[in-house]
Image (cartoon, grey):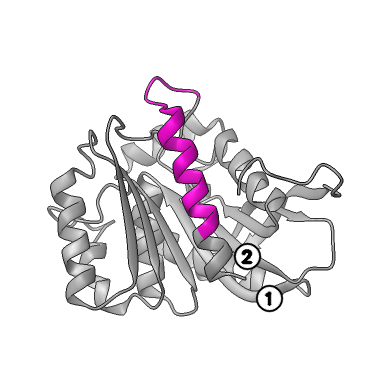
Amino acid sequence: MWNQFETTGYDGMMAETIGLKGYNGDLINAYFARPLGTGPYGSVVLVNHMPGWDEFYREFTRRFAQQGYAAICPNIYYRFGAGTPDDVVARARAEGGLVDSNVIGDCEAAAGYLRALPYTNGKVGIIGTCSGGRHAVLTACSVPGFNAVVDCWGGGVVQAETTPQRPVAPIDLTKNLPCPILGLFGNDDQNPSPEQVNQHEAELKKNNKTYDFHRYDGAGHGFFYYDRPNYRQQQAMDGWGKLLEFFGKQLA
């Protein structure tokens, strides 16, 4: 449970930017954090949102390390060049956005990196927010080996139309989902809307998948983001409790 550490416990971690061989062997950068200890630890791949590979996601990665996971957040925007997250995302938008196959390959490589560490237990979860939630679902349905997936208000899981960059709707791959999924959504959100969340849930039921969806009244898109007006403290803290409980069960 978040914020319930024993006061006598040891708390230490290592966090750094590393090189990672991503999709097609491309050398990208990634942010990696782990507890200082021998483990064995469960592992988490974090897929960042459309604001980019930003400070929030580095903090997000460190929080998982503090909770006892080896965690990595690959820079899925690496191919659009260097600069501030805002600058890089602007170039990505101008070029039509991220290419799904690149993101899937980067996340698959990140999972492989975590599994190969001597202090991990071989179990890997994946989590993303906003567009990263969509990519987390897409990746878990596209490559084998993930043990849990968390979709935080992933817009585009139910996709109205395909594009060259996004040639398939993740919901159409639901039959391939190999692991339990947790979903956290705001009922005031429009991407995904409550109707789209209903569609996703219905497809999971149809394919006999293990899922747990939580929908929050009074919350819209990005209600975890404490640096923005859409932050909702009560709903965010409840969501944190649920996702940590979920990963604690699935990645132990």
Q: Is residue 208 located in the magenta-colored stretch of the structure?
A: no
Per the rendering, the mark at residue 180 is none
**Are discs 1 and 2 less than 8 Å apart at CB?**
yes
- Helix, strand or loop at mark 2: strand
| Residue type indicated by callout 1 | Asn
Q: Amino acid at mark 2?
A: Ser
Above or below residue 91? Residue 148 is below
Which residue appears at 84% of the width and 61% of the height? 37
Find residue 230 and report its image quarter: top left
- Magenta-highlighted residues: 227-245
Which of the image's four quarters has the C terminus?
A: bottom right
Identified at 77% across, 55% down, the residue is: 35
Q: Position of residue 147 (x, y in %)?
A: 49, 73
Compute the Cα span from label 1 to label 2: 8 Å
Q: Which residue is mark 1?
A: 121
Residue at the top extreme, as displayed: 229
Residue 168, can we see it?
no
- Residue 203 placement (x, y as % from top left): 18, 68
Q: Which mark is residue 43?
A: 2
- Compared to residue 86, the image places residue 44 above or below, namely below
